[in-house]
Amino acid sequence: MENSSLPEKICLTHIVPGNHAASDYFAALRELLKHRQQENEHTEKSRWQQAIDDIYRLLDDEIRTNRAAPIKPVSFGTSGWRGLLGKDVHVHSVRQVTQAIINIYQQAAGEPKLARALGVQNIDEARRRGVVLGHDNRFGGPVLAEAAAALLSGKGFTVHFAGETTTGVISAAVLVTGAAFSINLTPSHNPLEYGGFKYNAADAGPAAAIITNRITKEAEKIIRAGEEPVADPAPNLIHPLDSLACWQQLVRDNHHRHGLDYDAILAALKQRDDYVLAIDCAHGASRVHLDTLLAGLPARRLLRFRDQADPTFNGIAPEPSSENMAMVRQALQDRPEPLKLGAIIDPDGDRIRFTDGTREFDMNMFGAMSYHYLHEHKGKQGPVAKTVASSNFANSIAAGLGEEVFEPPVGFKEFKPVIGKALVLFEESDGISVIGHTPEKDAYIGLLLALDMMLQRPGGLYDYLQDIRSRFGEFFPGRGGVTVSKQGEALQEALAGLEHYRVGDSLPVGDTPRTIKELITIDGRKMIFEDESWLMIRPSGTEPKVRFYVEARTEADKTQLLAAAHALLKEIGLLE
């Protein structure tokens, strides 16, 4: 080892030659990425990149050849199944989970309740209508998608193959093609070591619990039995699909419902010279759509960031966040145009966050603004839907407009009861959709909304936000999360330590005790205080984390509520 180069030493530390199971490829990748980022010389960067490429070749072999059961049991949570690439998510396990889905379609004819949730009567209908299949930018995505396509076509399913695409676009494609379901091989915004499998039924929205529970159970049975699903692919049943064209058609067809005129917005953008748009793709699938999505936009008006293929995401956590917004923010600050709009989109294009170069608009604010915009500027009537962890800004707007609020647990599938009724559906983690669009969150419809607001409001997004605040009040939401070692029952037992806080009890917030006036326990534990500020703690549905959310009526009070959330996690033993 003394004669080895540094890249070789790093690899030897984490990799056991010829033994995928004992090798930690992503630990090696993370170390190599740090060194690549620190280098200025092209030749030195190339040296580190070569080592990264070598590891990805090993990972490719593991993804293709691993026949072991996933390290972590397959489980479909709020947004599908996620696991470590190569160790959990590989060709064999993807085939097993795909077979589990095929099995539940075989069972549909004898179970009317299941058939209603699936949106098909039997497997023959599902085969005929087919599946929309795609993947995001993750390493191994095409290989995993090919494995699913081979099995599905071999079992008689028409496969509408979308290739690399986004979750919202796939959802639109299901609605436009009339497909029976969709599969998108993506772990959404999870870090580079994750793979994932999103399944949506015929309604094109995240599947109901009756389906995801059944998929989990069927997959567990198949994996425990060591089944190796095999089918000869039927190439005549696999058809390429322009999924973005489906999205465009859906938006145009439903212009009368949501009021967003896609073509008029594009036409205005082509003609005007008083704005600049900056988009950060975070190396994700949105980069393959930008040219078509915003066709005809002058190059000087569109700044593009991280729009190159990179399954490592250059080491960042690929999510819409303040930290990741820095490049877009800086670029906009340096521009002279009076109207500025920046956006960052996550890898599978179902989350988006905005900035004007000075201020940030997360979905807590933007979702509420969108509701007001469709209601007041587009003349649409109806309720707003927001998850329980989202800001009450939208609640205040709805109350002022004489409309109702639908407030379910976290997870876009929880909006099913108000699809087609609520004008806007959003969750605090930067997901949004609108009436007449997909029942799945979609960054592109959020972008279209923001562009329309920018074009129609002379002062831009912040001026519009201030106008709404002057009428409906100021709200200051915040959130955080901590990685925890406890899982399952042990985690639930720890979180149960919060149950002794009840209505009427006091909780220390800053220097002043605050009285709990209401408790909401539909998703974790949300404590609402007498001054309408609140604090919520819940386990993540996708990662080994506990998340906490707060909302205050001043910025200073938000800091105190976040500190109180940390104190509660310490109290129940989840933080030191």
Image (cartoon, grey):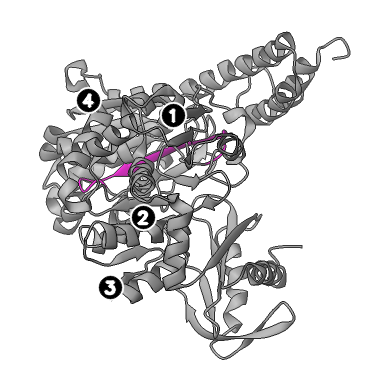
- 322 or 47: nearer the viewer: 322
The residue under label 2 is: 412
In the rendered view, tell whether residue 205 sits above or below residue 20: below
Distance from Cα at disc 3 to Cα at disc 2: 21 Å
Q: Residue at x 56, y 51 (%)?
A: 359
Disc number placed over residue 301 in the picture, else none: 1
Of the two numbered discs 1 and 4 in the rendering, the one whose residue sits closer to the viewer: 1
- Which residues, given as a range, are shown in magenta? 190-204
Q: Is the C-beta separation of discs 3 and 2 under 8 Å?
A: no
Q: Which mark is residue 153?
A: 4
Assess whether residue 89 is covered by the magenta stretch. Answer: no
Q: Position of residue 6 (x, y in %)?
A: 80, 17
Q: CA distance from mark 1 to mark 2?
A: 33 Å
Q: Amino acid at mark 3?
A: Glu
Q: Secondary structure at mark 3?
A: loop
Residue nearest the observer in this picture, 189 or 88 = 189
